[in-house]
Amino acid sequence: MSQSVAAAPLIGRDEELARLAGVLERARAGTAGAVLIAGDAGVGKTRVLDEVAARATHVGMTVLTGHCVDLGDVGLPYLPFTEILGVLADDERFAAALAAHPAVDRLLGAGTDAARDAGSRLRLFEGIAGLLADLSDIAPLLLVLEDLHWADQSSRDLLRFLLSRGILQRPAGGAPTHRLAVFASYRADDLHRRHPLRPLLAELVRLPAVERLELRPMGDAEVARLVRALRTGPVPDGTVRRIVERAEGNAFYAEELLAASDMEAGGVPSGLADVLLIRFEQLSDTAQQVLRTAAVAGRRVEYDLLRDAIQLPEDELESALREAVERQLLVPGQGDTYSFRHALAREAVYADLLPGERSRLHGSFARLLAGRGHPAESAAERAHHYRESHDLAEALAASLEAADHAQRVGAPAEELRHLETALDLWTSVDPAARPSGEGIDIVALTLRASAAAAHAGDSHRAVSLTRSALAGIGQDADSELAARVRYTLAGNLIGVDSLTAAFAYSSEALAMIPSEPPSRTWVWAAATHVMAARQVGEDGIALRVARQALRTAEELQLADARADLLISLAGLEGGGRRTREGRERLAEARELARRAGHAPVEMRALFNLAIGSFESGDLEESLPWLTEGLDRARRAGLLSSPYPLEMRYLQLLVLYTLGRWDECAKAAASDAEVLPHAGGFTMGPALYVGLARGDLKAAERARALLDGPFDWMAALVSGIVLTDAAAFQGDPEAAVERMRAAVTALTDDSGRRPDVTVRLAALALSAVADRTVALRQTGDEAGVRRWTDTATELVELARTVTKEGRSGRPQGPEGLAWLARAEAEWARAAMGPDAAAWEKAVAAFDYGDAYERARCQFRFAEALLTADRREEAAAQARTARETAARLGAAPLLARLDTLIRRGRLGDPAPDTGDRPSPLTARERDVLRLLALGRSNRQIGEELFITGKTASVHVSNILAKLSAASRTEAVAIAYRQGLITPEATASG
């Protein structure tokens, strides 16, 4: 069932709007200016102009809009100006101004008789210039001219006069110009080489008061936001991704694709296709033929290939190409290639082909590519063309060749795509025509596809494919193959946290083949069983099988399997990966895997080395291992596979924990560009930074991670952020609910709770303790008992998980630090501030977590102050304040300043200027006006924003500064040096 579509919001144009608002502000002050706004059709020019016009109207400007219209060869002279004058004539407010300039009457109902001779034409131009000047004396004026690419010659001449000799000119004596701005838009993609607007634009942009603004395509993230905002209900992630890829930053295309998202995938909406084909149909017949052929080739085509496919004389082909380039349908590229300017234009032309014509051209391109050199590189193209020409046997062979090439160059996602194509074709090709050879059958190909899916980071697809392979095995299947399918399925099930099923399948695999005589299949079945057994808590089984398998791997000289088993044993024997001995064993495994050329095992070793260092509190030591691991994954084309994703998250977490927050945020942004769909792995710690710095939208982004199928890391990240955000907002009910939901989601199917439970419990306890303290102050004993019981339940949960641990071992420094905080929060709820408990928590976080140490110091200072240990309290508060200021942790900083002030612990540390402001540039502007006592409406008028938008900014400022009122926000801002009395003094 389709969902309703909302009105299109304006997204991703803040910079352009700010620039246009600046021109309006200068115009209101008496300095006239003009902006020529360029952009492709559908990129959002009209939407931007509508927004600017609304803002101009809101601050008292008169807005006049004229539209140019495509009337072909029968253009109406001065059409946009006639429209403007018609609006003025219908409004009695402007009657006197119109009467003072009778020359303009020629355009009011005069039509094509408006200006026949040079003298009357000049009087008309001067009359309109004078009229606009007079109107700008009555009120500041914004003149908007849309679609200049369709402007008639007379309108272009009048615009030239107005901007070069009329309304923008500064009068003699240096007096101010008029209170007027001119915004004129045009389609950049419509301006072919001989378009009559080109010379006028070149002339106008040289004028001092005229500037050019290009509206570029929106970024992928902005298009995604637009798509989600357009629908009143949720939009599936897959739909959003497809629209983002196809729209290529064009807002109109995105809206049309969303409106037609229920149609068959890959099609172009009919309304959009009609728009895209208009320019195509204006070409000559030969140029249309060339574009049809090029559309079959794809988005880009080489000249030689196009020439051989279309078989036109070269002079005719070059003439047609020149015509298509001039009309901006094709763009010449490097290496004598041509590309469609927009992929959707190519899709529209392709869809317009007749079925027989399409099939014939695909066949031509397939044969041409087969006859050229570099067969491996062209395999993917050949597979596509053969399939579309219905030559399925050749398509199957080429798909397998393309998959082999993708595997060699380290492109697992592409390998998966080609293998799935081959699997789709397999049953449609006569068995005698199928490729033959070792490993080329339906089960083997399905297994290979599952491995590619796992390497590409699509764990759920890997499970689905392996189940399909299992279903395809007959009763008389080779036992070794049957075992291989089962242990592969077990490994993939571990990746989606289906641990009990993984253990069952790995047990079956190991039972299917004997350990004697020794075989590679048995060793890998055993290695997988070891991992599955560990995941369900069967460490005894895991240890016994690992030792036996390691001896067999050494006997068979299987270096990669030896490495994998050594990694498992490093976690099973001795003190585990946290100890120096354990990490030495991991380093040995990493070297074995490196020499064997087994990248996945090598990355498993590097991940364990890094997380072992982290868990032991050696944060700095973990970073080189992470850098090496991610570099290895990048070279192998495995960045999306499980261990590199884990390493990405861990790298960001280490930077966050060490207090290197700017590095963390920057690295997360870079990761999101490389792996935009990796969710919690690439953005988790950056959300922790955002929340700690007062960005309440971090909670919204964390909540969005929960959309779609279950993802363990997304559940972990969102649990941490949403629990902490609820505590920030003083909502213990929501904090406890979020904490419990996260623990339930992250508890595996064997019933073991995740280690992060301790952190989640401590965060929820913070909100519970706040509520309990407040209730105790009001004398609500029943409420105190209820929340104290909740606090006890949470701290008991933290104690239990810390003792047991998901790995079966007690937690390391991080887990113990969170337990110490949970204990201190519980004491605060049950009895009141406990200085000894908070002192222990501060010391526990000294392993390297700068922010959590500062948060504990804040509570420690509170407890010391309650115990009248003022000097110690002041020392703790000052140290915590320095950390909060360095990190830019605005909410914590504000709470510390309040504690210092109310506890009379001395003046807050002076601002050195090094601390980043927690507020955006716009929020600082709003804050300065807030300090002057401005209302929301007055703030909006001065900043060219609506009163509603100003109110949103004020609310954000109060939240970031933890202020209860506008007055308190201003006071905090003065104290923190965010504003100064000089900056806000009137006059």
Image (cartoon, grey):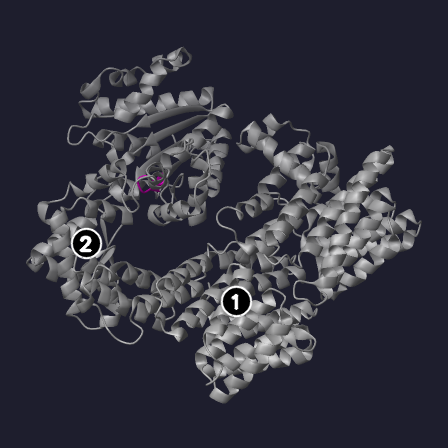
Q: Secondary structure at mark 2?
A: helix
Q: Residue at x 42, y 61 (%)?
A: 462
**Seen in the image, is 255 located left or right of residue 137?**
left
**Seen in the image, is 430 located left or right of residue 28?**
left
The extreme left residue here reads 313
**Seen in the image, is 978 located left or right of residue 359?**
right
- Please give the range of residues in magenta: 37-43
Work out how far the residue at label 2 is from the one at label 1, CA to CA, in angstroms. Answer: 40 Å
- Looking at the picture, tell me which residue is in the foreground, 646 or 433: 433
Magenta-drawn stretch contains 506: no
Q: Position of residue 552 (x, y in %)?
A: 51, 85
- Name the residue tied to disc 2: 296
Q: Where does the C terminus fall, quadrant-wise? A: top right
Q: Position of residue 605 (x, y in %)?
A: 55, 75
Please identify the quarter of the rendering in which residue 64 is found.
Answer: top left
Q: Position of residue 93 (x, y in %)?
A: 42, 13
Q: Secondary structure at mark 1?
A: helix
Q: Residue at x 63, y 50 (%)?
A: 744
Q: Residue at x 49, y 73 (%)?
A: 511
**Seen in the image, is 47 located left or right of residue 844?**
left
- Looking at the picture, tell me which residue is in the foreground, 748 or 133: 748
